[in-house]
C-alpha cells in the first residue's frame, strides 16, 4: 500500500473511532414506510426518540427502536464510564436506502400474471453528542479570532 493510501486509511480509521452508528440491512419493509418513521426521529434527542418509537403504532418503528438501542450500545462501548445523560446524544443522521427486491408473480384474470415487487431496505443511523458540536464550534471561532489578529 502506498503512503497516501495508508495515510487516508489511518485517517478514516481515526474518524470511525469517534463516530457512533448502527446499520440495519435487508429489512422486509418498503423503504417508503420506513422513511416515515426515520423522518419522525431525525434530529431528536435519544431519550425523546426512544419514547416516540416505543409508542408509535407503525411496525417499522420497532425495528428503528432496536437499531437506536444498538447505536447507543456502540456509543457506550467507545465511551466506557461515560453517562448517557451527560453526553446529550441526538440522532445526527438517519437514512433509508432501497435494498433487494424479490419479484413474484400473482395470478390475474384471463390467464395473465402481474408482477409483485416485495421491497426491502437498509437503514443507517448516526449518533452525535451535542457537547462535541459545541466544542467544534468553539474551536472554529478561536481559529477565526486568531486569524483576524
Image: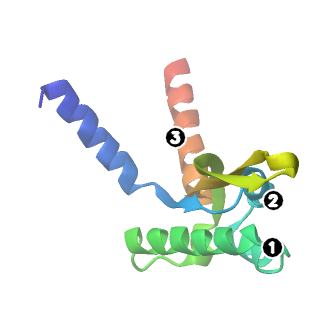
The residue at which mark 1 appears reads as 52
Q: What colour-coding does the image apply?
A: rainbow
> Which badge, 1 or 2, is on the more N-terminal residue?
2
Q: Is residue 52 above or below residue 35?
A: below
For the point 36% across and 56% down, which residue is it? 17
In the image, residue 95 lies at what x, y percent? 64, 49
In the image, residue 93 lies at what x, y percent? 63, 50
**Left or right side of 42 for 8:** left
The residue at which mark 2 appears reads as 40
The residue at which mark 3 appears reads as 139
Question: Alpha-carbon neighbours of circle 2 within 10 Å: few (<14), some, or many (≥20)?
Answer: some
**Left or right side of 96 for 126:** left
**Left or right side of 141 for 31:** right
For the point 80% across and 73% down, which residue is it? 52
For the point 63% across and 67% down, which residue is it? 88
Asked if residue 127 can be seen in this view, the reply is yes
In the image, residue 138 lies at what x, y percent? 57, 43
> Which badge, 1 or 3, is on the more N-terminal residue?
1
> Which badge, 2 or 3, is on the more N-terminal residue?
2
In terms of image quadrants, where is residue 8?
top left
15 vs 95, nearest the viewer: 95
Q: Secondary structure at mark 1?
A: helix
Q: Secondary structure at mark 2?
A: helix
Quarter that holds the N terminus = top left
Amino acid at each position: 500500500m502506498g503512503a497516501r493510501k495508508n495515510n487516508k486509511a489511518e485517517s478514516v480509521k481515526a474518524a470511525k473511532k469517534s463516530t457512533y452508528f448502527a446499520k440495519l440491512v435487508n429489512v422486509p419493509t418498503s423503504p417508503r414506510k420506513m422513511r416515515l418513521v426515520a423522518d419522525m426521529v431525525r434530529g431528536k434527542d435519544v431519550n425523546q426518540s426512544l419514547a416516540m418509537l416505543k409508542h408509535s403504532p407503525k411496525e417499522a418503528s420497532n425495528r428503528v427502536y432496536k437499531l437506536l438501542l444498538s447505536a447507543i450500545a456502540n456509543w457506550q462501548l467507545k465511551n466506557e464510564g461515560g453517562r448517557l445523560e451527560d453526553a446529550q446524544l441526538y440522532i445526527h443522521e438517519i437514512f433509508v436506502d432501497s435494498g433487494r427486491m424479490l419479484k413474484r408473480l400473482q395470478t390475474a384474470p384471463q390467464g395473465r400474471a402481474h408482477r409483485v415487487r416485495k421491497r426491502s431496505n437498509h437503514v443507517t443511523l448516526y449518533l452525535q453528542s451535542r457537547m462535541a458540536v459545541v466544542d467544534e464550534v468553539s474551536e472554529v471561532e478561536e481559529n477565526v479570532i486568531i486569524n483576524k489578529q
